[in-house]
């Protein structure tokens, strides 16, 4: 049973304009995800993860952003060329998103039940009774009592709001779920619960998922493959065993090194020197080179190409495989 | 597609609705119908003379009520339509006989008791200036009565020609109570029909009128205080007759669709001096002020020629006025400066005066020009102004000013009503004696002129009074108001306009 | 909710008392004798004095006020106008409906035009349309109603003779006054809507709705507008309140027998009963308008409704609502 590729991003470049400066948020990004796969998209704040996600759904803020180039192939069609109507059909029905901050992601003046109903009614032809029962069912699926259908978002805690968000996203059984740091705003115990829930649902509905996060621990829990993002580009991609066991890119190395080891005794955390680059004034060549402990002169001159070090393991570094 | 259809249908409906109203509203000077619409320049305060004596309300209820007496062409006081005869039987008694069979609008017959009721109820109210001297009205029969005064009063009969002394139905007033004036009853040529508060009063022709039936079936009086609106309303044909401000007259003059009529009035604008102010106590000073002012220039400037230069303190049409024999104020700024010097003022010791005016536009114009004229002869002027009510309460009530610009409209055709109120010491203050005159000689003259019933004696006294005031420059009359009326051509209304300000609207006809 | 409404209506009473006392004090302090004004020029001093006694003006200030209050509370009698002796309540019933209609229609026009163009300006921020709308708003707020009124009369009544120049009974009579008076509410509504929408459109939950695949129109109207409407409601309430007593000039120009004219004339004549009755009316309408707006808040925003339901006083309700909103934003617990 071959798992086919459902989403393939090719050479995507997205920029924002702010005070006449161009901020290159995503540069030449390539990414693919197969049916049923859970891809962890890891990177620091400002790496361009959310921008990538919003580009897939084409809900970037219209005024300040623009997709400069690239293709996003979904089920054989480049969704960047679809009409607005066609795109609306895809949103929610085929590709759904869970957002980062549950406190602000739900409409405060609408009941949670109605918000789930809205999603369902946009993509199906159910009558009123069926809408209600389906929405109630979704609430139960995410572990909320269905008698809370008529309650408003402000009557729920953060964790429960996020569950509502999950219920909304999954209510039409999308093929691809993009979860943008779904547990960052929650505390650890709730985080575990929500992740468990997402795992179960993912299994149940066979949904592919892109999980955006900066937390390698979360990635380890539920992802099957990992993409490391830095300054708008994927710098390393591979399966979870490959990345956790055999990471190659200096940045990935830095990330893993900065996780404190509970068994070691250290007085200082190991950090990566320097700061991420300013996306409106990127350095020439490899964008990580100013901070890279292995940087050579060539690194600063030209952007490195993708190097496949093992089947399915790609690294964007000229030193890959040579250390 | 669906959206476009909805939008289109909405657009078409909107346009359709607009076109219905767009086309059919023009009413460019149509022919005169049997309704006469008259614009009044102030609010209609009420229809009960006891509480509302202003000229504008009087113009309305003058069609409903009829007074006992009226003036004939020669200016004599004679019986009105409801009176059979009258005579003065002694110093304080007047014997009246009214006509039998005069019906009120409610069908009741007018009796002497109604006259007694109407006159006596006015004592001690706003009507006091007309009936205040009545001691009692003694009913002698159904149609006969005596009016007995407290003291002899030569001006009394003139008061009985005023519409405010029109006869009311005792029954209607008593039964009507507080809301009587929402359904007033009289004997006049028009009966009350309706009153749209703040808009208009509608009167219907009294078909059972005992006298000559009026021409128009319906009279509507609109209250339009804003002069531009009045002119607009006339121009678009919403009213048939309107009084105009000077600047609007040009629109209608020379237009064949309209007649423009100018009418004399009892009103004037004057410069007044405070009898009690030390600054103007010196006759030289008052003379100087008078010489400094060019009343002819002010008259032309303020009303664009729609006013007359004033001479006497009483308007020319008021009985006993010496306006015709009085010369206009002389403009001689050099002489003014000489007199000021004689009074001890010069460049280093300037005369400073406080001038009270109010915010009415004509008073403000005159006041501003007055200040200029006085400045030119070296007098410093401090103007205080505000709305009339506030000025009245703050200044006129207290007498703390030197000079002022005032207007006066004589309330009756007899000189007494103006002279007493403006110069008798008992009236000093906000009621009208803004000059605060306090002269026993003047008081005596006023009282004698008032109580004498001999016209020759009265004429002599009033001549004396006017001359004293005029020579003393306590009033420097500036201009006499001239009303400008315009009406649709075809309406014959020029003759109904009276200088009293109470126009005889029931006599208006149309020549079709 | 009902308890809240009843409480608010009861709260009206001290408000009206305060307003009436304040106005009574001010108008008594103004120079000018009502008795003398009622009788007119030429009244004798005795008559004026008699009138003063008749009107009760010789009594001390507090006694006058309490007498007036007593008549209202026990007899529902607002007294008679000093000037015309016509009952104040009768005059109010004649003049007030016109002003209500005029103010109501003007604000309605303002909302019907202002809100949609404000929405479009917000959605298409920085576009040509946006600039036009903002310039229009500036114009609408700067040009006084009477200038607009006179210009319209000149053009439509005199020149083109399409519309009547006065009155307020037929539809065609109402067009110009309502447009003249409605320009300012329209401009203010447009600006308020635009700024409120701009704030809301950027928020996260709007993005969530788009991510559901909802049509843009519904995103704006059903979600953004519903959240942005609170300041717009406030504006509407304020505009209406302002027009109730403040349409004097428009009423004068169009010869509409309205409350503005009545009150101004009454004040000029120091007609105390009429002024007091009129002011009381206006105060009541403004207070009721605010109440209606506050209730509308509760219907639009469930957080407000919850605060109203649970609290024991309106002041506490507002404080509690603010506090609970803050708590929710910070809470993370289950």
Image: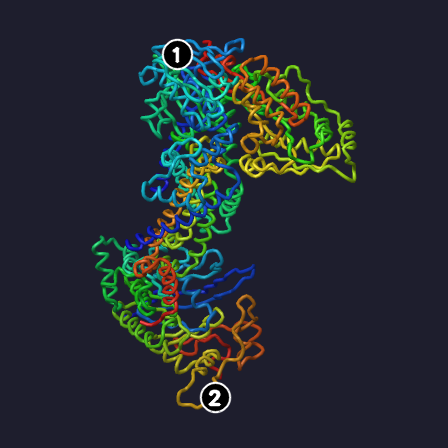
User: Is A277 or A242 nearer to us in this picture?
Assistant: A277
With A238 as the anchor, is B489 left or right in this view? right
| Residue B134 spot, x, y in % from top left | 45, 22
User: Is B40 or A140 nearer to us in this picture?
Assistant: B40
Residue at 44% in and 58% down: C202
Identify the subunit bearing mark 1. Answer: B
The answer to whether tags 1 and 2 share a subunit is no
In this view, B71 is above or below B242: above
Density class for disc 2 (Cα within 10 Å; few <14, some 14-19, many ≥20) is few
Q: Circle 1 sits in a helix, a strand or a loop, which is it? A: strand
| Residue A277 spot, x, y in % from top left | 53, 71
| Residue C49 spot, x, y in % from top left | 48, 34
- For the residues carrying marks 1 and 2, which lies nearer the camera in this image? 1
Q: What's the CA distance linking mark 1 and mark 2?
A: 124 Å
In this view, C145 is above or below B163: below
Residue at 35% in and 18% down: B113
User: Is B45 or A19 nearer to us in this picture?
Assistant: B45
Q: Circle 2 sits in a helix, a strand or a loop, which is it? A: loop
In the picture, residue A219 is in which quadrant?
bottom left
Residue under label 1:
B98
Query: Would you say residue B109 is visible in this rendering?
Result: yes
Residue under label 2:
A267
In the picture, the disc for residue C296 is none
| Residue C258 spot, x, y in % from top left | 42, 35
In the picture, residue A78 is in which quadrant?
bottom left
User: Is B99 or C329 nearer to us in this picture?
Assistant: B99
């Amino acid at each position: 049973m071959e798992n086919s590729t459902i989403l393939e991003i090719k050479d995507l470049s997205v920029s924002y304009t702010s005070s006449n400066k161009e901020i290159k948020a995503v540069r030449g990004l390539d990414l693919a995800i197969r049916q049923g796969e859970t891809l962890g998209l890891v990177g620091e704040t400002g790496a361009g993860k959310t921008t990538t996600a919003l580009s897939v759904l084409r809900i970037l803020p219209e005024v300040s952003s623009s997709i400069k180039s690239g293709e996003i192939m979904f089920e054989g069609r480049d969704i960047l060329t679809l009409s607005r109507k066609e795109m609306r059909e895809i949103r929610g029905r085929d590709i759904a998103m869970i957002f980062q901050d549950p406190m602000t992601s739900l409409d405060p003046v609408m009941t949670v039940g109605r918000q789930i109903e809205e999603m369902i009614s946009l993509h199906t032809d159910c009558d009123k009774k069926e809408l209600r029962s389906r929405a109630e069912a979704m609430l139960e699926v995410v572990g909320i009592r269905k008698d809370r259908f008529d309650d408003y978002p402000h009557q729920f805690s953060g964790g429960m709001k996020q569950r509502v968000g999950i219920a909304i996203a999954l209510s039409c059984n999308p093929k691809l779920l993009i979860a943008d740091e779904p547990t960052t705003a929650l505390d650890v115990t709730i985080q575990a619960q929500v992740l468990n829930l997402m795992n179960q649902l993912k299994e149940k509905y066979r949904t592919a998922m892109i999980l955006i996060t900066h937390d390698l621990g979360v990635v380890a829990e539920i992802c099957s493959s990992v993409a490391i993002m830095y300054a708008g580009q994927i710098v390393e991609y591979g399966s979870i065993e490959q990345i956790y066991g055999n990471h190659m890119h200096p940045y990935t190395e830095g990330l893993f090194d900065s996780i404190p080891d509970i068994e070691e005794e250290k007085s200082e955390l190991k950090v990566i020197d320097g700061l991420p680059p300013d996306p409106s004034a990127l350095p020439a060549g490899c964008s990580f080179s100013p901070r890279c402990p292995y940087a050579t002169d060539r690194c600063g001159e030209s952007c490195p190409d993708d190097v496949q070090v093992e089947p399915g393991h790609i690294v964007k570094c000229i030193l890959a495989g040579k250390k | 597609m669906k959206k476009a259809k909805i939008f289109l249908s909405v657009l078409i409906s909107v346009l359709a609705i607009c076109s219905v109203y767009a086309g059919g509203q023009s009413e460019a000077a149509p022919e005169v119908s049997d309704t006469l619409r008259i614009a009044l320049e102030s609010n209609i305060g009420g229809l009960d003379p006891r509480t509302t004596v202003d000229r504008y309300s009087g113009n309305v209820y003058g069609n409903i009520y009829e007074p006992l007496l009226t003036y004939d062409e020669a200016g004599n006081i004679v019986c009105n339509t409801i009176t059979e005869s009258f005579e003065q039987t002694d110093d304080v008694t007047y014997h009246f006989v009214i006509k039998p069979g005069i019906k009120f609008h409610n069908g009741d017959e007018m009796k002497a008791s109604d006259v007694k009721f109407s006159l006596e109820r006015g004592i001690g109210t706003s009507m006091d200036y007309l009936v205040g001297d009545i001691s009692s009205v003694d009913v002698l029969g159904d149609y006969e009565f005596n009016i007995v005064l407290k003291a002899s009063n030569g001006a009394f009969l003139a008061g009985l020609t005023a519409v405010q002394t029109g006869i009311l139905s005792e029954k209607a007033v008593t039964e009507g109570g507080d809301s009587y004036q929402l359904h007033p009853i009289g004997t006049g040529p028009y009966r009350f029909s309706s009153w749209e508060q703040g808009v208009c009063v509608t009167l219907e022709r009294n078909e059972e009128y005992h006298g000559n039936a009026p021409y128009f079936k319906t009279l509507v009086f609109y209250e339009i205080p804003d002069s531009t609106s009045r002119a607009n309303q006339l121009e678009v044909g919403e009213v048939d007759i309107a009084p105009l401000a000077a600047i609007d007259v040009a629109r209608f003059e020379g237009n064949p669709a309209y007649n423009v009529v100018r009418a004399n009035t009892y009103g004037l604008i004057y410069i007044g001096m405070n009898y009690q102010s030390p600054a103007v106590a010196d006759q030289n000073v008052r003379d100087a002020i008078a010489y400094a002012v060019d009343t002819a220039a002010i008259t032309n400037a303020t009303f664009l020629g729609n006013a007359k230069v004033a001479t006497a303190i009483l308007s020319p049409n008021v009985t006993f006025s010496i306006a015709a024999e009085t010369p206009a104020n002389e403009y001689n700024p050099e002489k003014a400066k000489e007199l000021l010097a004689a009074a001890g003022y010069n460049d280093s010791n300037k005369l400073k005066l406080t001038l009270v005016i109010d915010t009415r536009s004509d008073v403000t114009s005159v006041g501003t020009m007055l200040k200029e004229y006085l400045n030119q002869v070296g007098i410093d002027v401090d103007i205080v102004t505000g709305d009339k009510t506030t000025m009245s309460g703050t200044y006129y009530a207290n007498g703390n000013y030197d000079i002022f610009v005032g207007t006066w409209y004589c309330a009756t055709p007899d000189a007494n009503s103006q002279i007493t109120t403006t110069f008798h010491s008992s009236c000093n203050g906000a009621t009208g004696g803004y000059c605060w005159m306090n002269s026993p000689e003047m008081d005596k003259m006023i009282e004698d002129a008032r109580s004498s019933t001999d016209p020759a004696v009265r004429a002599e006294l009033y001549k004396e009074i006017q001359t004293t005031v005029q020579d003393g420059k306590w009033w420097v009359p500036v201009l006499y108001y001239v009303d400008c009326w315009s009406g649709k051509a075809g309406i014959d209304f020029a003759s109904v306009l009276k200088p009293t300000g109470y126009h005889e609207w029931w006599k208006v006809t149309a020549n079709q | 909710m009902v308890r809240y409404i009843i409480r608010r209506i009861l709260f009206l009473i001290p408000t009206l008392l305060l307003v009436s006392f304040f106005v009574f004090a001010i108008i008594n302090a103004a120079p000018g004798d009502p008795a003398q004004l009622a009788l007119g020029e030429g009244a004798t001093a005795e008559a004026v004095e008699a009138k003063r006694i008749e009107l009760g003006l010789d009594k001390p200030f507090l006694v006058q006020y309490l007498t007036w209050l007593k008549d209202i509370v026990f007899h529902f009698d607002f007294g008679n106008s000093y000037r015309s002796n016509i009952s104040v309540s009768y005059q109010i019933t004649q003049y007030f409906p016109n002003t209500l209609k005029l103010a109501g229609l003007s604000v309605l026009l303002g909302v019907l035009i202002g809100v949609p163009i404000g929405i479009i300006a917000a959605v298409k921020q920085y576009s040509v349309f946006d600039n036009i709308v903002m310039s229009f708003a500036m114009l609408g707020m700067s040009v006084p109603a009477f200038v607009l009124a006179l210009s319209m009369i000149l053009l439509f009544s005199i020149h083109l003779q399409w519309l009547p120049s006065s009155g307020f009974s037929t539809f065609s009579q109402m067009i110009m006054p309502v447009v003249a008076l409605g320009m300012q509410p329209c401009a203010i509504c447009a600006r308020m809507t635009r700024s409120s929408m701009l704030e809301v459109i950027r928020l996260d939950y709007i993005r969530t709705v788009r991510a559901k695949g909802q049509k843009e129109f519904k995103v704006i109207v059903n979600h953004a507008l519903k959240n942005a409407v609170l300041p717009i409601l406030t504006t509407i309430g304020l505009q209406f309140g302002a027009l109730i007593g403040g349409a004097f000039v428009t009423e004068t120009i169009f010869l509409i027998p309205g409350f503005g004219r009545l009150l101004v004339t009454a004040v000029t004549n120091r007609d105390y009963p009429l002024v007091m009755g009129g002011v009381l009316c206006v105060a009541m309408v403004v207070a009721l308008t605010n109440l209606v707006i506050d209730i509308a808040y509760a219907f639009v925003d469930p957080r407000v409704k919850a605060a109203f339901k649970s609290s024991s006083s309106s002041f506490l309700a507002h404080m509690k609502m603010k506090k609970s909103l803050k708590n929710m934003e910070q809470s993370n617990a289950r």
